[in-house]
Image (tube, rainbow, N blue to C red):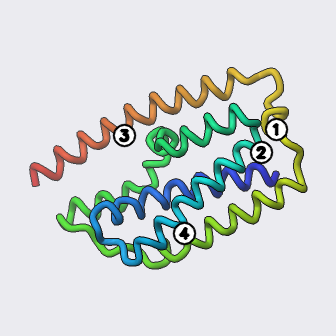
Amino acid sequence: MLNIAIIALILVGITVHNYLSSYWEQGLLPYSIGFLFFANSFALVYLVSFIWMFGIVAGIIIALLCFLQIVYSAGLWIFIIPWLININRNFAIPRVNPLIYGGFSFLVEIVAILTVVNFFVSPYKSMWELMGENVWTPILIFFGVLVVGNVARITLRITLMSKFVKE
């Protein structure tokens, strides 16, 4: 159960990281050195966590999928839609939400603490053993979500952009 909680928090962290990265890329993020520290720490924490849960090879592959934003583009982008609609309506980037910005550091610390606790609670490769011999089903589901998510994201982007350009 702790493994599922850690994975859920990592997915939340990836979404928050993408939100904050858009401000950082525009130079609108105050105290960007702190954000960079926690963003790099977050990548290291989820790498260690995935290696412990899935083993060295699968853990590195899953961490790379997260690091390269493939997991985000597959389905987590849905949670950023209200923010993108607000940007396109007002033709300006709103200020960063201080609750989300301040909460990111706590989120990284919580995931790090839960990862350390997970070393004592669950055995190495516990999620891999949970899947058992049925490894291809999660892989096929992920690729299905990846294809459908990216098609939906591109279709929605074209639809929304054409609507806002007409206005």
Indicate left or right for 117 with 48 as reference. Answer: right
- Circles 2, 4 touching at the beta carbon (< 8 Å): no
Percent coordinates x, y for residue 82 in the rendering: 37, 60
Percent coordinates x, y for residue 54 in the rendering: 75, 38
Question: Quick check: 149 above or below 81?
Answer: above
The quarter of the picture where residue 108 lies is bottom right
Q: Which residue is mark 4?
A: 104
Q: CA distance from mark 2 to mark 4?
A: 23 Å
Mark found first going from the N terminus, 2 or 1: 2
State the residue in front, 141 or 100: 100
Question: Which label sits on residue 125?
Answer: 1
Q: CA distance from mark 2 to mark 1?
A: 6 Å
Mark found first going from the N terminus, 3 or 2: 2
Percent coordinates x, y for residue 107 in the rendering: 62, 67
Residue at 24% in and 39% down: 158
Q: Which residue is mark 2?
A: 52
Question: Quick check: 42 above or below 56?
Answer: below
Q: CA distance from mark 3 to mark 4?
A: 25 Å
Q: CA distance from mark 3 to mark 2?
A: 32 Å
Q: Secondary structure at mark 2?
A: helix
Question: Quick check: 128 above or below 140?
Answer: below
Q: Amino acid at mark 2?
A: Trp
Q: Amino acid at mark 4?
A: Phe
Mark found first going from the N terminus, 1 or 4: 4
Question: Which label sits on residue 153?
Answer: 3
